[in-house]
């Protein structure tokens, strides 16, 4: 046992020595990619396959994929690596962290790399869906390249719909239809609910995202897309959205009170304990592979307009990466976001491919033919807008999520909750506002 | 084990008192022997502690700017933060609600299984099993148990025609659900210490008590507990340290929610450092926690030593 371990260590040391020895001056540029995957072992293996392919086709570069856990953990580990003076050459970051990273000076502009390739920023971004620009382009500079993206979407159990006398071919389009269907689909035995009409995740991160989706559907703006120090929590459009969500609990009694975790919501839907769910398109492949009943997906129901925020992640190059490593990272980033790879990753995960040309490829066409649900997700992109991002995004988001959770638990009324959320958020953003929008001439 | 270490130290201390001129040589030998672990402690414990001290007095004045000296601003900001006060209050409830029940349970298990026989060994192993499961894994299991409607807990409640609450999603219940997991996880561990402690209770003390006509409660109160005093003190320290240093389950189950109702001090510190990029406040929070840990450990160890002293006297 010990001897095997020792020999492995020895071999590793030897390999390392060989890799770094000057005798191999032609050694490929070594870069590492920090990547998160949503909880699924298969995706980490898919990523390894993808990078292996890259290394085989690019002998001058040796890329190493480093699995760094969730989006949050990837952020922590990238920051730790930067503090230690060894930033990864590239990292896949949650798309709404980019603004914060830019404000803190932790990621690089990619403009010069795009220019070297002989493209303008607009031409470069032009290959991606327009909904994705807002989270990648900051102050007219490109800071990230969209890698995989999602939107919230409505999932319905077609069997339950038929059983309740609803038409599964016509899923609810408006809040009216949505609330009525949810009420009709809820089943009770005495006081005990045996089946909920709808399930909506409300834990941190997803809760804020879905409330943003409902606010967008209600004509709202949620946050200032052009300025990192403003959110519109205490606004009529947000109040309408939060009240509607709360009414599903207290009026229609079709949604379980309290906070629901994303995993619990998917489980409830798959086990038939909930007839509909609002969730990410990122769950689509998982639901497709595990649903034992016919299901359908549809746009998020609207009150005033069809509009949803995007989600997902972008590729970034941290500050401190330069020279050969930076160019190698750029090669990797472009390869990973090319139509072929983008499409392949999309089919493996259920996320949509940010590169529009991916959908012109025969593989993708055949896939959409076979899986019309995936097409709905892509179609909804025409109505998608950027994801919530401000100064200190996570904390500002938590300000409203804490209040959302209090409302869903019956602790607060929507209006007072939103006033409190606005106050907390303003407090968090105050230092930034004071050094930007409120920094005025003193003379 | 703790017994041996502590009495060993006591002997050393009395030696020193008797022969002060030997202290220097002894000190050198001691330092030499301690050097290997001291180096690592210095590198991985004391140096980071110093860094935390430095960080607690520094912060960024504006985003992206360097760290500057801010004095006690981080601490005033910390105590003014309602989320910190909430985490502090939660941690107090959590401490009382987990340490005392797990102590009582552990003592109960240990007394029931004190006699060594095959059945008891099996039960000891069963009660000890949760200790072997890493906290993160245990939390992932409990995620299933607590799942509303379909989880194990609700499944059995459903058989009784009861509907369970939203275990992790109701701000009034979530902290207690997490406390339940903690008790389940720790009681078996503490049982081990009590099992060891019970071996040290002399059989003739019980015999004498029985001859004097003491009932089972009286025997527990006047024979078992006094003998177990040092063990209780020790387990109390271990338990209180666990309460402050373990938040893996909070991370997995609730991330401090709903509405901060399960936020604990260490998780709050994590949020400040990672989500809020406020390293100054995170460091200040860490120091408050460290101060608490020091106070707990110091006072408990003093009590511990005193109770050892009582027994020897």
Image: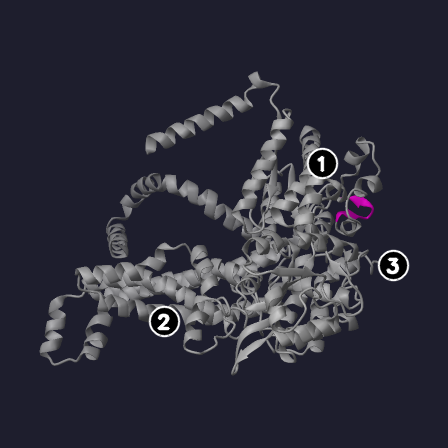
Tell me the residue at 38%/62% (across/down). B185
Label 3: which secondary element: loop
In this view, B47 is above or below A86: below
Position of residue A140 measured from the top left corner of the image (x, y, whole percent): 83, 46
Position of residue B25 measured from the top left corner of the image (x, y, whole percent): 30, 40
Crowding at dot 2, Cα within 10 Å, few <14 / some 14-19 / many 20+, comes out as: some
The image shows a total of numbered marks equal to 3
Please tell me which residue lies in front, A4 or A363. A363
For the record, the magenta segment spans A136-144
Please tell me which residue lies in front, B118 or B236. B118
Dividing the picture into quadrants, the one containing residue A335 is top right
Chain ID for label 1?
A
Precedes in sequence: disc 3 or disc 1? 1
Chain ID for label 2?
B
Same chain, labels 2 and 3: no
Residue pointed to by mark 1: A334
In this view, B258 is above or below B128: below
Chain ID for label 3?
A
Crowding at dot 1, Cα within 10 Å, few <14 / some 14-19 / many 20+, comes out as: some
Residue pointed to by mark 2: B101
In this view, A398 is above or below A176: above
Magenta stretch contains residue B39: no
Q: Residue furthest right?
A: A443
> Label 2, label 3: how many angstroms apart (C-alpha)?
62 Å
Please tell me which residue lies in front, A406 or A293. A293
Residue pointed to by mark 3: A442
Same chain, labels 3 and 1: yes
């Amino acid at each position: 046992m010990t001897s095997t371990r020792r020999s492995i260590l020895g071999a590793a040391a030897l390999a390392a020595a060989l890799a770094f020895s000057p005798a191999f001056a032609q050694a490929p540029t070594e870069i590492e990619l920090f990547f998160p995957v949503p909880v699924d072992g298969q995706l980490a293996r898919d990523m390894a396959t993808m990078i292996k392919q890259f290394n085989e086709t690019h002998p001058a570069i040796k890329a190493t994929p480093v699995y760094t856990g969730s989006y949050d953990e990837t952020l922590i580990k990238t920051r730790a690596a930067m503090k230690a003076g060894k930033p990864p050459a590239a990292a896949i970051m949650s798309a709404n962290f980019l603004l914060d990273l830019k404000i803190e000076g932790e990621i690089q502009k990619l403009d010069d790399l795009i220019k070297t390739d002989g493209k303008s920023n607009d031409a470069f971004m032009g290959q991606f869906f327009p909904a994705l620009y807002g989270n990648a382009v900051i102050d007219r500079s490109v800071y990230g390249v969209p890698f995989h993206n999602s939107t919230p979407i409505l999932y319905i159990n077609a069997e339950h719909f038929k059983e309740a006398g609803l038409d599964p071919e016509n899923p609810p389009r408006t809040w009216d239809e949505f609330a009525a269907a949810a009420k009709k689909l809820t089943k009770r035995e005495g006081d005990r609910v045996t089946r909920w009409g709808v399930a909506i995740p409300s834990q941190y991160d997803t809760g804020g995202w879905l409330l943003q989706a409902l606010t967008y559907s209600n004509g709202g703006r949620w946050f200032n897309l052009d300025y990192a120090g403003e959110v519109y929590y205490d606004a009529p459009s947000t109040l309408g959205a939060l009240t509607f969500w709360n009414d599903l609990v207290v009026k229609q009694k079709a949604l379980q009170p309290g906070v629901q975790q994303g995993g619990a919501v998917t489980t409830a839907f798959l086990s038939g304990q909930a007839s509909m769910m609002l969730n990410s398109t990122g769950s689509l492949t998982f639901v497709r592979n595990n649903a034992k009943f016919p299901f359908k997906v549809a746009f998020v129901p609207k009150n005033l307009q069809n509009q949803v925020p995007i989600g997902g992640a972008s590729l970034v190059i941290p500050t401190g990466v330069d020279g050969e490593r930076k160019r190698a990272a750029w090669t990797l980033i472009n390869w990973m976001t090319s139509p072929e790879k983008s499409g392949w990753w999309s089919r493996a995960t259920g996320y949509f491919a940010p590169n529009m040309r991916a959908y012109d490829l025969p593989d993708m066409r055949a896939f959409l033919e076979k899986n019309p649900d995936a097409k709905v997700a892509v179609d909804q992109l025409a109505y998608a807008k950027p994801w919530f991002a401000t100064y200190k995004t996570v904390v500002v988001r938590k300000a409203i999520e804490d209040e959302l959770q209090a409302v869903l638990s019956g602790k607060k009324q929507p209006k007072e909750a939103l006033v409190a959320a606005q106050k907390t958020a303003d407090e968090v953003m105050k230092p930034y506002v004071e050094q930007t929008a409120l920094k005025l001439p003193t003379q | 084990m703790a017994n041996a270490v502590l009495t060993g130290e006591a002997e050393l201390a009395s030696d020193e008192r008797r022969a002060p001129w030997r202290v220097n040589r002894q000190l050198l030998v001691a330092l030499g022997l301690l050097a290997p672990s001291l180096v690592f402690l210095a590198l991985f414990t004391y140096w980071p502690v110093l860094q935390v001290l430095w960080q607690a007095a520094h912060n960024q004045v504006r985003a992206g700017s360097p760290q500057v000296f801010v004095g006690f601003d981080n601490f005033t900001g910390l105590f003014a933060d309602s989320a910190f006060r909430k985490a502090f209050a939660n941690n107090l409830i959590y401490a009382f609600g987990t340490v005392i029940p797990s102590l009582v349970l552990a003592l109960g298990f240990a007394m029931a299984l004190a006699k060594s026989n095959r059945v008891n060994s099996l039960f000891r192993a069963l009660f000890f099993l949760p200790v072997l499961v890493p906290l993160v894994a245990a939390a992932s299991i409990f995620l299933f148990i607590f799942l509303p409607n379909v989880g194990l807990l609700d499944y059995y409640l459903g058989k009784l025609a009861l509907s369970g609450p939203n275990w992790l999603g109701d701000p009034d219940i979530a902290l207690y659900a997490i406390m339940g997991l903690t008790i389940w996880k720790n009681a078996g561990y503490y049982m081990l210490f009590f099992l060891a402690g019970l071996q040290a209770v002399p059989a003739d003390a019980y015999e004498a008590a029985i001859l004097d006509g003491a009932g089972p409660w009286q025997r527990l109160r006047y024979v078992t507990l006094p003998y177990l005093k040092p063990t209780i003190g020790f387990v109390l320290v271990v338990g209180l340290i666990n309460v402050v240093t373990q938040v893996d389950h909070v991370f997995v189950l609730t991330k401090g929610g709903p509405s901060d109702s399960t936020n604990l001090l260490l998780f709050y510190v994590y949020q400040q450092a990672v989500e809020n990029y406020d390293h100054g406040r995170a460091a200040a929070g860490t120091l408050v926690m460290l101060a608490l840990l020091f106070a707990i450990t110091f006072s408990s160890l003093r009590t511990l030593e005193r109770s050892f002293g009582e027994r020897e006297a």
